[in-house]
Amino acid sequence: MRRLVFTIIICFLTASAFAQEIDSTAFKALDAKIAEYVATLEPEPLEVKERECDFMIENTSDSLLRQYVAIKLYDHYLNSPVMGDEAVSIHLTDAWFVPAKVKFQSEAELMNARVYADFNRQSLLGCQAPELTLFSTDSVATQVRFERYSVLYFYDTDCSKCKMESVFLKPLLNRKNYPIDFYAVYAGVNKGSWLKWIGDKFNVTASETRMINLWDPEVSSDFQMKYGVLNTPKMFLVAPGGRIVGRGMDHRALEQLLDLYLSQDDYEYGGAETTALFDNLFKSYGDTLEAADILHAADLVKSRTLDKGDTLFFKHLEGDLLYYLSNHKGEAWNAGALDFVNEYILSRPEIWRSSDDTVKVVGLAEMMNDLLSRTPVGTRLPKDFPIPGWNKFRKKGGWLIFHDSGCHVCEAELQALDSLQSDLPKRSRAKVLEVETGKLFNAHPEVMNIVLDTFDLSSMPYIIKIGKDGLVERKYVTFLK
């Protein structure tokens, strides 16, 4: 609908005798529609905003109107109060103004747009923070590292806005005692003025906040280009691992973001809301669910969170998915869960690094990996296993079923298998080796310990399809429809 309304307005204006002669009232109507259009886009991700801006410009055929619309959009996103929206203005520069598909009103405006784009494209939201090696007060080269949440604050001692911002930053950091690294980067060259500033304004005493004062008087690090420091103050928030999650902030925005990101230890995984979310997601697969579908869901979460620079939301949703998978059993579920814990939890120590992560997420992932990795598909059962009839069964293959008395699901699975077998000719029926775990434990606890180390008996029954010579063909099988 929003596209339709915009197109109608453009068609009306283009249909006028000469677009150049359209009066100011008509342009005011167009301004209102553009404002209405971009307002509806405000909650959308950046790629949607970029695509919609391209649509608006492409569908304005008259050259004067196209220029008018493109510049209006550029100005809006360049000055938008929404954090990160400036990326859209850079997109418009690259896609429309630099190739001269649309022209600014002067070469000076184009040059300013190009300079802004070149000085800011490396430090947009979601980008990996560019590497920096700066210098301490005693001239020691110091590499900026993003091992925990870090703030990059570029300032100048002659900057009035910097002085005002620093008045608020010092008490904020002392009061909140954030467990962060605060890199205060002096952008000037007057060492005496810098040292006085540090003593007066950045003598932060918070025990958890690490204050690192740095500068680069020779600009050998190219920090101005890498972080768009065309003026000061300039402040960024960087997540552990180096993803930029905040830029263009003042002390109020910094406090809001740090309170949000550092509150993650209070998060309880596996809540009803996300369980319902994953129920709806996986319901669409029905009986066709495959292990790859679970990784696809995890990839989708990553594309909407971590790839956009939101590490916290990524951890919450992927942690919720881990808990969700831990409560679902079956061939596809378990195979997908094994791939998931390895790709999204255990191989990402830079993400899951807090003590809370270790207790709530990594520990569960390690336990699931241990259980799900036992007796993998494609391997062979051990020879001479201490269970009666083992070697004969292993040679010919069939169904290996671990179950327990009093387990209603176990009884239902065995009855379902009997029903399936009864429909087949006797010579076509698979061999079945049943192991009743309760009896085995009571009679031979030492053997049961070996069984528990070899197979995942965390959920009963445990049914495995075995081929000839003990080849494991399937795991976590169910006969129930």
Image (cartoon, helix red, strand yellow):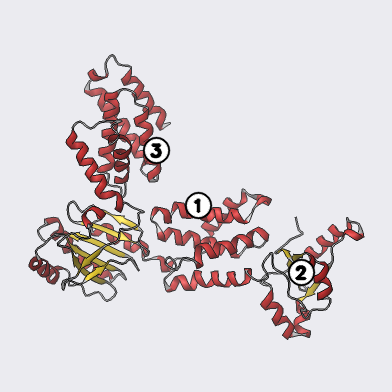
User: Residue visible at 26% across and 54% down?
Assistant: 226
In this rendering, the label closer to the viewer, 3 or 2: 2
Say which quadrant the C terminus sits in: bottom right
Q: Is residue 271 visible?
A: no
Packing grade of label 2 (10 A; few <14, some 14-19, many >=20) is many
Residue type at tag 2: Gly
Q: Along the line of sight, which residue is nearer the eye, 100 or 452? A: 100
User: Mark 3 or mark 1: which comes first in sequence?
Assistant: 3
Residue 425 rendering spot, x and y as whole percentages: 91, 57
To which residue does mark 2 refer? 470
Label disc, if present, on residue 51 of the rendered structure = 3
Residue type at tag 3: Arg
Residue 211 rendering spot, x and y as whole percentages: 23, 71
To which residue does mark 1 refer? 300
Say which quadrant the N terminus sits in: top left
Packing grade of label 1 (10 A; few <14, some 14-19, many >=20) is few
Asked if residue 295 is positioned above or below residue 352 in the image, the reply reads above
Residue type at tag 1: Leu
Task: Find numbered disc 1 in the image and state the secondary structure of the residue it sits on.
Answer: helix
